[in-house]
Image (tube, rainbow, N blue to C red):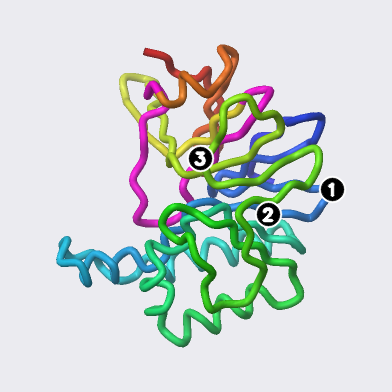
Amino acid sequence: MNGHDFSLAGTPLVALGSGALYWPSEGLLCISDLHLGKSERRARLGDGYLPPYETQDTLTRLENDLRLTEATTVICLGDSFDDRAAAQALREEEKLWIAALQAGRRWVWIEGNHDPGPVELGGTHLAELPLPPLLFRHIAKPGQSGEISGHYHPKTTLRTRGRAITRPAFLIDADRVIMPAYGTYTGGLRSDDRVFTDLMRDEAIAVLTGPVPHAVPLPRR
């Protein structure tokens, strides 16, 4: 499997190159910040045009990850939609696609700051989900242990052979994982930003997503 193996709170996990997190013993796949419908929201608010293909691209990658892992539980870690209106504006074939992905699986939508209310789709809607020894929520809280969160869309730059490669990244230490954004049209916050240095331990690592996930010490300012 294309991923970086590590443990959090004694729990073996895999950071996949796609940006999804896999918990093998539980058959659980976690993804964060899909921001489905971002192009629709941008157009609706007059913020500029984006080609309206991000939902199909994101769902295609998710379908591939589900096929790869055979996960029976899926946790969407907040900001699954760019706002509630974007969820309601999904095309019928996209709603049916999500329903097909949910079939036969436990599916949990964690509330995010972009989608604080329930959406009219299948699955369970929760503010956060404790699955001891782990806890799944949208935004990290200081002083937590075993926490898996998203929200910040971390990205990291790797410099090699005179080139700089910037990719979405998992941030990992002994207490927490901050997930990269899974959605196609999501931006990112540099992993040396003060918000991460305040949250992450000194020994934290960043795992760059991509065909071959690559772990590096968390960049610090």
Distance (Cα) linking label 3 and label 2 = 16 Å
Query: Which dot, 3 or 2, sits closer to the camera?
Result: 2
Residue pictured at 48% horizontal, 60% vertical: 116
Which mark identifies residue 209?
3
The quadrant where residue 214 appears: top right
Task: Give the left or right position of residue 138, taking residue 55 as reference.
Answer: right
The percent coordinates of residue 199 (x first, y second) are 52, 24
Farthest residue, direction bottom: 92
The percent coordinates of residue 137 (x first, y second) are 60, 46
What is the span of residues highlighted in magenta in the rendered image? 173-194
Q: Amino acid at mark 3?
A: Thr
Main SS category, magenta section: loop
Q: Which numbered disc flags the more N-terminal residue, 3 or 2? A: 2
The percent coordinates of residue 162 (x first, y second) are 31, 19
The quadrant where residue 163 appears: top left
Q: Secondary structure at mark 1?
A: helix
Distance (Cα) linking label 3 and label 1 = 22 Å
Q: State the residue position of label 2.
A: 29
Residue pictured at 17% horizontal, 61% vertical: 47
Image quarter of the C terminus: top left
The percent coordinates of residue 68 (x first, y second) are 68, 59
The answer to whether residue 184 is magenta is yes
Residue pictured at 36% horizontal, 35% vertical: 189
Q: Amino acid at mark 2?
A: Leu
Q: Amino acid at mark 1?
A: Ser
Q: Which numbered disc flags the more N-terminal residue, 3 or 1? A: 1
- In the image, is residue 19 above or below residue 59? above
Which mark identifies residue 25?
1
- In the image, is residue 18 above or below residue 76? above
The quadrant where residue 72 appears: bottom right
Distance (Cα) linking label 2 and label 1 = 11 Å
